[in-house]
Image (tube, rainbow, N blue to C red):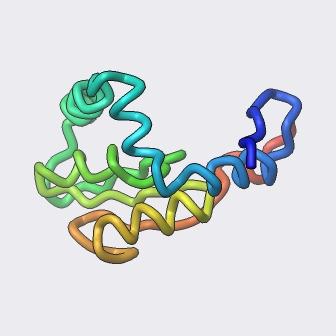
Amino acid sequence: MTPTRAGLDKQPADVAAMFDDVARRYDLVNDVLSLGQDRVWRRAVARAVDACAGERVLDVAAGTGTSSASFTASGATCIACDFSLGMVRQGARQRGGADIGGVRFVAGDALAGFAN
């Protein structure tokens, strides 16, 4: 099956389905395509956010939660939210559960209720 291409004319359900299809290998492909640079970017974002112990971070469009996990090193908790159920499920599977290690996975659409 050839994945569909995301574009501005796509319906949200179509985009979510595309990410559902690639969820299992998403993190590996990110690593390979960016030559590991994605790890540097995640650390830079975590430093910029500078979340402290006791604080909560909402990671919107979190995918598998790889970035979300970087916020918990300082003791913060993170809610990893994505509208692709496949990505949320894969992230929870990779990390051992839907609410573990300071990261809580939830499915949600950040654009729900907004006009296009």
The location of residue 84, given as percent across then percent down, is 62, 57
Q: Nearer the viewer, residue 101 or 79?
A: 101
The location of residue 1, given as percent across then percent down, is 74, 49
Residue at 88% from the left image edge and 31% from the top image edge: 9
Residue at 57% from the left image edge and 49% from the top image edge: 22
Q: Nearer the viewer, residue 85 or 1?
A: 1
* Above-or-below relation of 83 to 116: below
Residue at 70% from the left image edge and 48% from the top image edge: 18
Q: Nearer the viewer, residue 5 or 114?
A: 5
Left or right: 63, with 112 as reference point: left
Residue 27 appears in which quarter of the rendering? top left
The location of residue 46, given as percent across then percent down, is 24, 36
- The furthest residue to the front: 1
Residue 6 appears in which quarter of the rendering? top right
User: In the rendered image, which quarter contains the C terminus?
Assistant: top right
How many dots with numbers?
A: 0
The location of residue 53, given as percent across then percent down, is 13, 55
Q: Nearer the viewer, residue 33 or 80?
A: 33
Residue at 46% from the left image edge and 50% from the top image edge: 25
